């Protein structure tokens, strides 16, 4: 049996990981079919005659201060959660993997320069750095994704570098050098495949952190801008109504918690199934 099949079987035996995958699959389906699931094409439609309606059959998640249906706004907010999770991880994974491969494989001056840059970014609190970047670039979904992607680049670079420094000393890598393969061929054919499991696990764990970061930025007014609403933005706008309409804050908060837990369950399951340890020097 191949290593891939063994890893898949081990992953599927992890009940929490399977539960996490089911939750994430449902989130994707909900985001894709948001109009059908929510029953409306306009989650921002206002009805001033139905403000602060408690959760009921007609409005499962109630309505807000402008009479907007919270069910629809939460469903449409799932789209932004998926976008942030995918694109922030894509940015940080590509940048971090390339930098980690170069740093770990070549060492020397290249390693010192890249490591110093990654340490400089890593030394700053994630939210402080993300706030600084979004303040410089401006608020909005695109700039929010760029900021978070940059903040998480060192996480990939450090673990990839650590793994590459071990892999480059393996006999098959030395043999590839001996037969005349160039560095690019060696990295692509022999080094990268051996660090891919670490990259996959790191991506699943960073996606959860990225969603929390986006929610925090949106809460502070630097993420998704109105009239669109991410779950973080819904938390921001509803905090002043906690006494009168607590469901406005509780529901998006629970959604963020659910998705983050699901991603962590999947990440832990992948780490066990692929038998990797995320370590960085």
Image: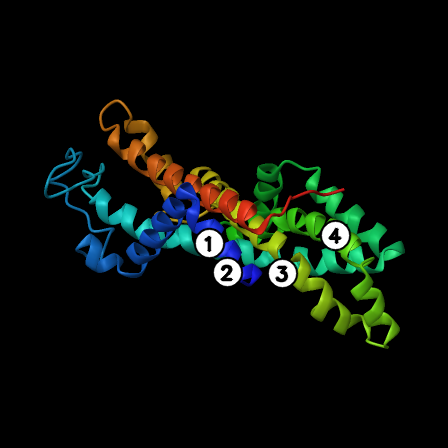
Relative to 151, say whether 194 is above or below.
below
Q: Position of residue 206 (x, y in %)?
A: 55, 46
Q: Position of residue 94 (x, y in %)?
A: 62, 60
Relative to 149, say whether 180 is above or below.
below
**Which residue, given by chain and number where applicable, does mark 4 sit on?**
161
Instruction: Using the rendered image of the protein, determine whether residue 206 is visible from the camera's viewpoint.
Output: no
**Residue drawn at 25 percent across, 32 percent down:** 247
Residue 9 image label: 1
Q: Position of residue 113 (x, y in %)?
A: 83, 52
Marks 2 and 4, how far apart at CA: 27 Å
**Residue drawn at 70 percent across, 61 percent down:** 98
Q: Are marks 2 and 1 in contact (CB under 8 Å)?
A: yes
Q: Secondary structure at mark 2?
A: helix
Which of marks 4 and 2 precedes in the sequence? 2
For the C terminus, give its image quadrant: top right
Q: Nearer the viewer, mark 2 or mark 4?
A: 2
**Which residue, given by chain and number where applicable, does mark 3 sit on?**
94
Which of marks 1 and 4 precedes in the sequence? 1
Marks 2 and 1, how far apart at CA: 6 Å
Q: Are marks 4 and 1 in contact (CB under 8 Å)?
A: no
**Which residue, given by chain and number where applicable, does mark 2 sit on?**
5
Which of marks 1 and 3 precedes in the sequence? 1
Marks 4 and 3, how far apart at CA: 13 Å
Instruction: Using the rendered image of the protein, determine whether residue 212 is visible from the camera's viewpoint.
Output: yes
Residue 159 image label: none
Q: Position of residue 260 (x, y in %)?
A: 44, 41
Q: Give the left or right position of residue 275, taking residue 161 as reference.
A: left
Q: Are marks 3 and 1 in contact (CB under 8 Å)?
A: no
Q: Secondary structure at mark 1?
A: helix
Q: Nearer the viewer, mark 4 or mark 3?
A: 4
């Amino acid at each position: 049996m191949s290593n891939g099949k063994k890893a898949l079987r081990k992953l599927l035996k992890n009940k929490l990981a399977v539960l996490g995958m089911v939750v994430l699959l449902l989130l994707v389906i909900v985001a894709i079919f948001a109009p059908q699931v929510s029953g409306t094409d306009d989650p921002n439609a206002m009805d001033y005659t139905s403000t602060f309606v408690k959760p009921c059959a007609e409005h499962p998640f109630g309505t807000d201060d402008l009479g907007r249906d919270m069910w629809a706004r939460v469903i449409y907010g799932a789209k932004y959660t998926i976008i942030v999770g995918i694109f922030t991880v894509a940015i940080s994974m590509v940048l971090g993997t390339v930098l980690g491969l170069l740093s770990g494989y070549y060492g020397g001056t290249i390693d010192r320069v890249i490591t110093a840059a990654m340490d400089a970014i890593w030394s700053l609190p994630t939210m402080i750095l993300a706030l600084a970047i979004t303040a410089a670039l401006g608020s909005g979904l695109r700039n929010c994704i760029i900021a978070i992607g940059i903040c998480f680049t060192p996480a990939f670079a450090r673990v990839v570098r650590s793994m590459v420094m071990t892999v480059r000393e393996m006999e098959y890598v030395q043999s590839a050098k001996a037969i005349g393969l160039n560095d690019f061929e060696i990295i692509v054919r022999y080094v990268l495949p051996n660090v891919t499991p670490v990259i996959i696990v790191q991506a699943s764990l960073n996606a959860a952190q990225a969603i929390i970061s986006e929610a925090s930025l949106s809460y502070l007014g630097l993420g998704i801008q109105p009239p669109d609403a991410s779950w973080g933005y819904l938390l921001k706008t509803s905090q002043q109504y906690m006494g009168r309409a607590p469901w406005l804050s509780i529901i998006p908060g629970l959604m963020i918690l659910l998705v983050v837990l699901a991603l962590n369950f999947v990440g832990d399951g992948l780490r066990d199934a692929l038998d990797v340890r995320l370590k960085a020097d």
